[in-house]
Image (cartoon, rainbow, N blue to C red):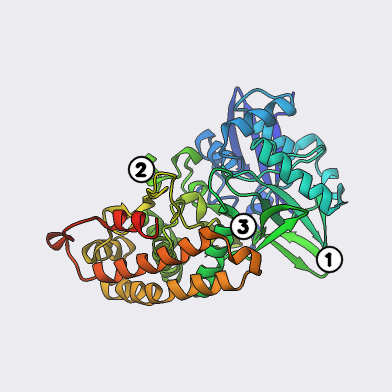
């Protein structure tokens, strides 16, 4: 049985308390914290006021820190002796190392828990064994005596950088990297994600740094956490939240089709909290995700960094092209997560859709078309160059040859359609069909 109060700590300061009473959650900032000139909000959905935020806001924020996979959450609940769907209890158990800068500490353990942290070195063999376990059981995220959490559906675990070696962070010590074996049902998925991230970086967008590594014979993508920073020899947490949390939406609503935020709502939020530069960065990110046919650019895969009153759109993460084929030769993921001017199908966005996208963003159609032209010209070479940067054995993966060819075709289709309007829709096969059958 967990206690009824969690102390929230940000940037080394006590922020306030989350209280569970009669099954409902409430969060209130401390008056002393509100008086600080550098106070950082826990969430954009919970501004710095004396208001007591009720269950909808608190539950959405905390659930956003947990895995999206129901089976993983149930396994964690069983491991910690909790009821299924006990969000508060799970955060009390693992809230010392979650996404962002906040630590969630049971009130009875505060402040002593802030000083209780350690890092246990691990060997390459131990990391390889973790990857084998995940491949055998995609719900086996947590190791023994580990207390961390990451959102998302993909299997993963955290590591702490120790020079050229690795460790497991415990207690108040932060992890620094995320390790993902990739989606087992998609051949070479981790490698495709790594190449996609490299390509987007080559296109001039900010992305989280990734490496494709093999621990013994076990491949994985290793992601450097952008919500961690080393300063004066110590690792620190930087606060962030994803955009479902910023809108106080349950993670189950991350896709626009399920009631999640689309381009217009996100652009309005960024304009009001960060400014026009963040809107443009977001707009270019949507274009880049479309050109790579990355299907998971939903609200939980965009985040904002929070420090004091400053709000900044975070670097991109989890960008992975979906230009792979099923055994039948069809596109595995034929649609984008967010509508672009009323259309989501890859290869089908026309000039009129881009103009509608510009209206939703609140920028000129000419600016959006400039982005599309620039990024569509860069995407093929960025992808090919990223493949060539790999080790010889990795770059020979047949999935990467198909990826590079389809990104090139996707860019050609996008440029062809840029000056097409709805009344001039292509005759013959759809863009999606052309993509699916190319180099089948």
Q: Could you tell whether 9 is left or right of 422 in the image?
A: right
Could you classify mark 1 by the number of other residues whose Cα lies within 10 Å: few (under 14), some (14-19), or many (20 or more)?
A: few
Mark 2 falls on what kind of element? helix
Q: Earlier in the sequence, mark 2 or mark 3?
A: 3
The residue that mark 1 highlights is 163
Q: Are marks 2 and 3 in contact (CB under 8 Å)?
A: no
Q: Give how far across and how far down residue 70 sits, in percent.
A: 57, 32
Q: Is residue 115 visible?
A: yes
Q: Give how far across and how far down residue 291 sits, in percent.
A: 39, 64
Mark 3 falls on what kind of element? loop
Q: Quadrant of residue 67?
A: top right
Q: Could you tell whether 428 is left or right of 323 in the image?
A: left
The residue that mark 2 highlights is 257
- Label drawn at residue 96: none
Mark 2 vs mark 3: in front: 2
Q: Quadrant of residue 358?
A: bottom left
- Give the spatial CA distance, label 2 vs label 3: 32 Å
The residue that mark 3 highlights is 40
Q: Earlier in the sequence, mark 1 or mark 2?
A: 1
Mark 1 vs mark 3: in front: 1
């Amino acid at each position: 049985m967990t206690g009824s109060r969690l102390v929230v700590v940000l940037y080394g300061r006590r922020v306030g308390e989350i209280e569970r009473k009669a099954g409902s959650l409430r969060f209130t900032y401390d008056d002393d914290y509100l008086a600080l000139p550098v106070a950082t909000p826990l969430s954009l959905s919970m501004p710095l006021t004396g208001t007591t935020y009720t269950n909808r806001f608190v539950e959405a924020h905390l659930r956003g820190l947990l895995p999206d996979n129901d089976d993983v959450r149930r396994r964690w609940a069983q491991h910690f002796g909790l009821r299924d769907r006990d969000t508060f209890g799970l955060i009390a158990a693992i809230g010392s190392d979650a996404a962002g800068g906040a630590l969630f500490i049971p009130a009875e353990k505060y402040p002593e828990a802030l000083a209780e942290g350690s890092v246990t070195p691990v060997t390459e063999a131990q990391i390889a064994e973790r990857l084998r376990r995940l491949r055998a059981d995609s719900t086996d995220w947590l190791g023994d005596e580990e207390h961390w959490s990451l959102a998302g559906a993909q299997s993963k675990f955290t590591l702490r950088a120790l020079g050229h070696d690795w460790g497991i962070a415990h207690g108040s010590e932060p992890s620094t990297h995320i390790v993902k074996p990739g989606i087992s049902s998609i051949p070479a998925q981790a490698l495709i994600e790594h190449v996609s991230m490299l390509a987007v970086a080559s296109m001039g967008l900010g992305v989280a740094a990734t490496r494709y590594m093999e621990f013994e014979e076990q491949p994985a993508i290793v992601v450097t956490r952008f919500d961690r920073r080393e300063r004066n020899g110590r690792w620190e947490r930087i606060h962030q939240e994803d955009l479902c949390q910023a809108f106080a939406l349950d993670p189950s609503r991350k896709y626009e089709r399920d009631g999640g935020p689309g381009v217009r709502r996100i652009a309005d939020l960024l304009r009001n909290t960060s400014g026009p530069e963040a809107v443009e960065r977001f707009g270019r990110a949507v274009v880049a995700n479309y050109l790579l046919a990355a299907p998971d650019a939903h609200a939980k895969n965009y985040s904002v960094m929070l420090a004091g009153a400053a709000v900044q759109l975070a670097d991109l993460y989890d960008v992975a092209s979906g230009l792979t084929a099923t055994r039948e030769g069809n596109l595995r993921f034929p649609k984008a997560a967010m509508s672009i001017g009323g259309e989501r199908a890859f290869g089908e966005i026309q000039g009129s859709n881009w103009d509608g996208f510009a209206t939703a963003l609140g920028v000129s159609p000419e600016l959006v078309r400039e982005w599309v032209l620039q990024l569509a010209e860069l995407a093929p070479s960025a992808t090919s160059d990223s493949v060539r940067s790999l080790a010889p054995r990795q770059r020979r993966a047949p999935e990467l040859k198909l990826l590079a060819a389809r990104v090139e075709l996707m860019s050609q289709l996008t440029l062809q359609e840029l000056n097409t309007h709805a009344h001039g829709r292509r005759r013959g096969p759809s863009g999606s069909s052309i993509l699916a059958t190319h180099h089948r």
